[in-house]
Image (tube, rainbow, N blue to C red):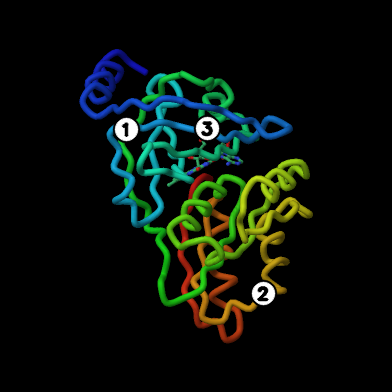
Amino acid sequence: MNLIKRKALVIFEKQFGKTGHVLDVRAWNPSTFYEIDLHLPGVDMSKWQSVQHMKCKVADGVYRDYTPAHWDEDTQTCTLYVDAAHDGNGSKWAASLKPKDQITYLGISSTFTKPVSSASLTCLGDSSAIGHFLALEQLAGKGNVSGAVVIKEEEHRKAFMSYFDSTLEAIPQKVSSNINNLQEWLKEQNLDGRAVYLAGNVPMVVELRKIIKALPGFNGRVKVQGFWW
Ligand SMILES: Cc1cc2nc3c(=O)[nH]c(=O)nc-3n(C[C@H](O)[C@H](O)[C@H](O)COP(=O)(O)OP(=O)(O)OC[C@H]3O[C@@H](n4cnc5c(N)ncnc54)[C@H](O)[C@@H]3O)c2cc1C
């Protein structure tokens, strides 16, 4: 980054940067997925009506989006669920965090993902979408969200099923394409009148949307949130 850009970013961070505190970090085994408990002083979580995302500073001049889930408005705490199986600044940041660390973020804002009150909700995504769907489940109420998340590691699937009291299923990555893995799961489902939420890899959610829209007799809604390319 050149000097002018760096100076501009420092000014921007000073003006808009907010601080959070790491309360705890739990790595799943193998350590390619992290639960990060945060305290975010001054954040009014009671206003959250849709799933949120926060731009976290993960390296000098580098910001990445993560989803605050399992929030508690009284204590102003939440948990990030970070898929860190790939090589990236965000993955390195998640792996480096320890309790009592300070984090910087550039605000929290709403995504378009929120419960549709008149329909049953079905979520489909990859590991990066776990927090996003848990946040939707918190808004919709336990038992009101079903669906499948592709989780490659068997131990991670076990962790998902035992840690969360969720009606979401953790399914294995049987073939390399998550489009095919989720399409296979879809064959057993009745999506009649449902609101379907897709999140994760961008080409995956775009293709799944096409597949679902083309299902014979499908009369529900499809909501798409692309995360990464
Ligand atoms: C609104 C929103 C909310 C999000 N919430 C979450 C969240 O709660 N948890 C979460 O884990 N992610 C979440 N993401 C996705 C996350 O921001 C991206 O995965 C981000 O690219 C990770 O940054 P990185 O620096 O680790 O990798 P990058 O430097 O961005 O990418 C490095 C390489 O890794 C690949 N890559 C990036 N992410 C993944 C992945 N998940 N799996 C496999 N390959 C990948 C890229 O294609 C690239 O080749 C969210 C994204 C958005 C837009």
Instruction: Say if disc 3 is inside 8 Å of ligand 1.
Output: no
- Mark 2 and mark 3 lie on one chain; the one further toward the N terminus is 3
Q: Which of marks 3 and 1 is in front?
A: 3
* Residue farthest bottom in this picture: 217
Q: Nearer the viewer, residue 116 or 64?
A: 116
Structural crowding at the residue carrying mark 1, measured as other residues with C-alpha within 10 Å and reported as few (<14), some (14–19) or many (≥20): many
Res. 106 mark: 1
The residue beneath circle 2 is 189
The residue beneath circle 3 is 36
Is 224 situated above or below 103?
A: below
- Residue 39 screen position, x and y as percent: 40, 31
Label 2 secondary element: loop
Disc 1 marks a residue whose amino acid type is Leu
Disc 3 marks a residue whose amino acid type is Ile
Q: Are marks 2 and 3 in contact (CB under 8 Å)?
A: no
Instruction: Say if disc 2 is inside 8 Å of ligand 1.
Output: no
Residue in view at x 47 percent, y 55 percent: 138
Label 1 secondary element: strand
Quadrant of the frame with the N terminus: top left
- Mark 3 and mark 1 lie on one chain; the one further toward the N terminus is 3
Label 3 secondary element: strand
Q: Which of 12 and 135 is in front in this view?
A: 135
* Residue farthest top in this picture: 3
- Disc 2 and disc 1: Cα gap in Å? 39 Å
Structural crowding at the residue carrying mark 3, measured as other residues with C-alpha within 10 Å and reported as few (<14), some (14–19) or many (≥20): many
